[in-house]
């Protein structure tokens, strides 16, 4: 006798984690005991990665060592850069990122070792190098050479320099860092669960993260941040929201950046991103974009009671920072890789194969017909 889970495993608790907690009814998100509202205004992204992996906040010397260690690991394998050049300028950035992560897995010195020490080294390399891969993708598609990392710069400052060829302002770098912190971990979301399923076969860290990137790409998950921005562009201006929405609902379109499987109240990450968006769009002279986003939010909530999720205002934050739209989802991966790798380590530390069953709905008892008689 087996129980059948509802479609999409809604509401099913499949395993345990000590990394993050979500209360979807109260709108609570906790990383290792710290509410996101405590962390977002105070912690940095790498500080939060340290927290997630170690279960405690670092003291200053530990954080300095951690940041320096990761900074020294930013350079990707030359074969990865060659592979990214080979996939060419027209590759979808998330597909190129998936390939970049996969190539890194081939050339990783710990590729054949799933021990805890090896996993930690691989996790550090992945968090350190995904920004280098994304920046290289952005350069290569413009016909430019990738820029090597500068370990004297912070994680996000170096990413901006490698991606754009020039350093960003301290405010822009800090805003990017905070979005990564907000994207870091989120229970058994689809991409993290994909990572854990792969890890649970005792496959390797890079295979799991490659799968995570693939799962994140979809528009029902991480791909929603770029689709949300495309929606706002399609609408164009605040006064066009009403007619656009009426048509969208009539066509049964999903409004990207709205709705969530777990949150039935405001996504606490959206609270921070809305506030950031208001400030950053104003600084960028994009007040109209913020007004448009607010109007769409108000009308969707009024019509359907569906609330914005993490991806909605993150899209406007990234737009205000001047980031190309198709890099929004890769940036989500740049944050979530801290969570993916943490979950792979947690899975390997206490593993059992994840292998649910399916309810068969096909025919039975068919008899064999030779090929020339079918
Ligand atoms: N726009 C319009 N209608 C929606 C939306 C939306 N964004 N989200 C949910 N609904 C409606 C559905 O049409 C459905 O209505 P129905 O019962 O009349 O058919 C109802 O709400 C329930 O939707 P489900 O798809 O069953 O809810 P589920 O929990 O499976 O979906 C999901 C969650 C995929 C996030 C959904 O809300 C959605 O498609 N949102 C848009 C994409 C998006 O923003 N994804 C990012 C999520 S956050 C993240 O992954 C980081």
Image: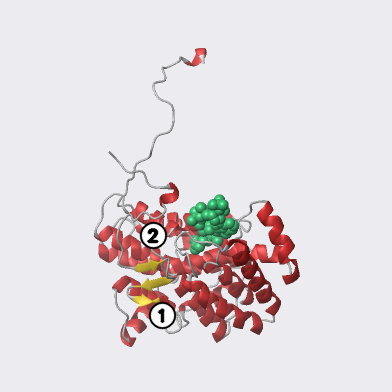
> Residue 279 lies in what quarter of the image?
bottom right
Is 13 situated left or right of 289 in this image?
left
Q: Residue under label 2, please give it.
A: 188
Question: Do we see residue 37 in this rendering?
Answer: yes
Residue 363 appears at what percent x and percent y? Answer: 43, 26
Residue drawn at point x = 53 percent, y = 61 percent:
259
Q: Residue furthest top?
A: 373
Residue 84 appears at what percent x and percent y? Answer: 54, 59
Badge 1 marks a residue whose secondary structure is helix
Residue drawn at point x = 39 percent, y = 21 percent:
365
Q: Residue under label 1, please give it.
A: 39
Residue drawn at point x = 37 percent, y = 61 percent:
108
Question: Between marks 1 and 2, how big is the CA–CA gap?
Answer: 20 Å
In depth, the one of 282 and 147 nearer the eye is: 282
In depth, the one of 351 and 161 nearer the eye is: 351
Q: Count residues near mark 2 (Cα–Cα under 10 Å), then give few for <14, some for 14-19, many for 20+.
A: many
In depth, the one of 192 and 247 nearer the eye is: 247
Quadrant of the image for the N terminus?
A: top left
> Residue 320 lies in what quarter of the image?
bottom right
Q: Residue furthest left?
A: 350
> Residue 231 lies in what quarter of the image?
bottom right
């Amino acid at each position: 006798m087996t129980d059948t889970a509802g479609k999409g495993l809604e509401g099913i608790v499949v395993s345990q984690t000590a990394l993050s907690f979500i209360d979807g009814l109260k709108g609570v998100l906790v990383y290792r005991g710290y509410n996101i509202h405590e962390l977002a205004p105070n912690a940095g992204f790498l500080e939060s990665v340290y927290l997630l992996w170690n279960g405690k906040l670092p003291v200053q010397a530990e954080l300095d060592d951690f940041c320096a260690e990761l900074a020294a690991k930013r350079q990707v394998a030359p074969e990865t850069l060659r592979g990214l050049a080979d996939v060419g300028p027209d590759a979808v950035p998330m597909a190129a990122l998936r390939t970049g992560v996969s190539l890194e897995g081939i050339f990783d010195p710990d590729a054949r070792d799933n021990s805890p020490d090896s996993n930690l080294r691989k996790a550090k390399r992945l968090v350190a190098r995904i920004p280098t891969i994304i920046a290289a993708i952005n350069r290569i598609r413009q016909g430019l050479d990738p820029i090597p990392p500068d370990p004297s710069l912070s994680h996000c400052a170096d990413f901006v320099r490698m991606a754009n060829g020039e350093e960003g302002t301290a405010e822009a770098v800090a805003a990017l860092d905070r979005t990564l912190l907000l994207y870091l971990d989120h229970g058994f979301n689809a991409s993290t669960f994909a990572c854990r399923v792969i890890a649970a076969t005792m496959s390797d860290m890079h295979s799991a993260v490659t799968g995570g990137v693939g799962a994140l790409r979809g528009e029902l998950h991480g791909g929603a941040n770029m689709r949300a921005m495309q929606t706002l562009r399609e609408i164009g201006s605040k006064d066009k929201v009403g007619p656009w929405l009426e048509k969208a609902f009539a066509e049964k379109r999903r409004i990207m950046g709205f709705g969530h499987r777990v949150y039935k109240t405001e996504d606490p990450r959206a609270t921070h991103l809305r506030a950031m968006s208001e400030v950053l769009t104003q600084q960028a002279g994009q007040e109209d974009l913020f007004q448009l986003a607010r109007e769409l939010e108000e009308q969707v909530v009024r019509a359907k009671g569906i609330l914005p999720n993490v991806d909605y205002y993150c899209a406007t934050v990234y737009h205000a920072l001047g980031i190309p739209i198709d890099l929004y989802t890769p940036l989500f991966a740049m944050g979530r890789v801290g969570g993916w790798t943490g979950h792979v380590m947690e899975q390997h530390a206490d593993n059992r194969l994840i292998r649910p069953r399916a309810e068969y709905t096909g025919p039975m008892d068919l008899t064999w017909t030779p090929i020339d008689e079918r």
